[in-house]
Image (cartoon, helix red, strand yellow):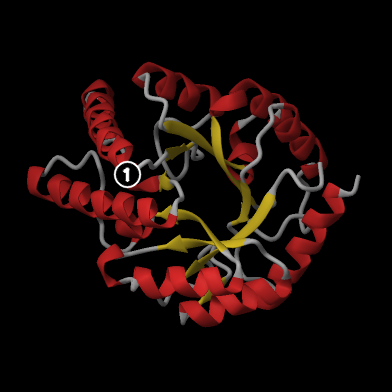
Amino acid sequence: MKNRFRFSLSIATEKLSPSAPVIFRGEIQDIIKKAKQIGYDGIELQLRDPDKLDAEAVKKYCEAEKMGISAIATGLEYSLNGLSMIDDDNARREKMRGKLIKDIELAGFFGCPVIIGCVRGNIPSDRDPSVYLQRFQKEMLFLSDIAEQHHVTLVLEAINFYLNNYLNTIQETCDFIDSLGRSNIKLHIDTHHMVIEEINMARAVRYAGSRIGYVHFADNNRMYPGAGSIDFKSIVEALDSVHYNGYITLEIIPRPSDEACAVRGLEYLNSLMNI
């Protein structure tokens, strides 16, 4: 099991709230170097505006440090820019689509997936959910076509009910992915959301099986794995049983400090690999 997974951590160049689940923030080259020194294999880029990233420089520096880009995360477009894929306003939806196309192009350059998480938006409580689900399905199929041109996988995240009001459980999200019938749309699982939504987390991983395209680890309290109550050993065993061999990325709050949680989280992950 030891060599099956690669380990990554979520980072951002934006100034974010201390409670945001991002470990390192600031200059990206400094972050890459620090993450490498700690022992990580890659970083996940939380981007607000893909056009502002010097992709050539980042790729060159990653190659020099032998680090990967595990994924392009898009949630800041929703949380900071207020854009979503199911917005009633056509112009705003078109703007969101354009941003995601840029993310896909960037992911193609880095050779990594694009996360579709909270950027999908919430369905208004007084509206017909089927209208918004159909709209989201249409947007996903459109993006899938673009992603195919760039050899990119879209990973759709199952998110708990108090952040998103649809596609909350692993089964719901898998069923939606199956309905799309696209090989480049996979499932993104996050243990912090799973501990809220799933009755049995390991069983849910096994249900998802080969649909899983990306993994976030965070404990039930959004701290580093091992700082809470989640049984990560059973989840790692389940991931191994379905032959997942991609990144496990820490998307956690930087507590007690950014470096401390990065170090402790990786130490815990490595201890699981030796079981």
Q: Is residue 116 depicted above or below 32 in this figure?
A: above
> Which residue shows up at 78% across the image and 67% down it?
264
Residue 159: x and y in percent read 49, 40
Residue 211: x and y in percent read 54, 27
> Which residue shows up at 76% across the image and 45% down it?
230
> Which residue shows up at 71% across the image and 34% down it?
239
| Quadrant that contains the C terminus | top right
Q: Nearer the viewer, residue 126 or 131?
A: 131
| Quadrant that contains the N terminus | top right
Q: Nearer the viewer, residue 37 or 221?
A: 37
Q: Is residue 164 depicted above or below 71 in this figure?
A: above
Q: Residue furthest right?
A: 275
The answer to whether residue 230 is left or right of residue 60 is: right
Kindly indicate the quadrant of the structure image that contains residue 7.
Answer: bottom right
Q: How many marks?
A: 1
Kindly indicate the quadrant of the structure image that contains residue 180.
Answer: top left
Mark 1: give few (<14), some (14-19) or many (20+) Cα within 10 Å: some
- Label 1 is placed on what type of residue? His
The answer to whether residue 61 is left or right of residue 201 is: left
Q: Is residue 181 depicted above or below 87 in this figure?
A: above
Q: Which residue is disc 1 drawn over?
A: 150
The answer to whether residue 219 is left or right of residue 181 is: right
Residue 107 appears anywhere in the view:
yes
Residue 125 appears anywhere in the view:
no
Residue 133: x and y in percent read 28, 26
Q: Is residue 240 depicted above or below 20 in this figure?
A: above
Residue 82: x and y in percent read 25, 57
* SS at badge 1: loop
The answer to whether residue 178 is left or right of residue 246 is: left
> Which residue shows up at 49% across the image and 24% down it?
174
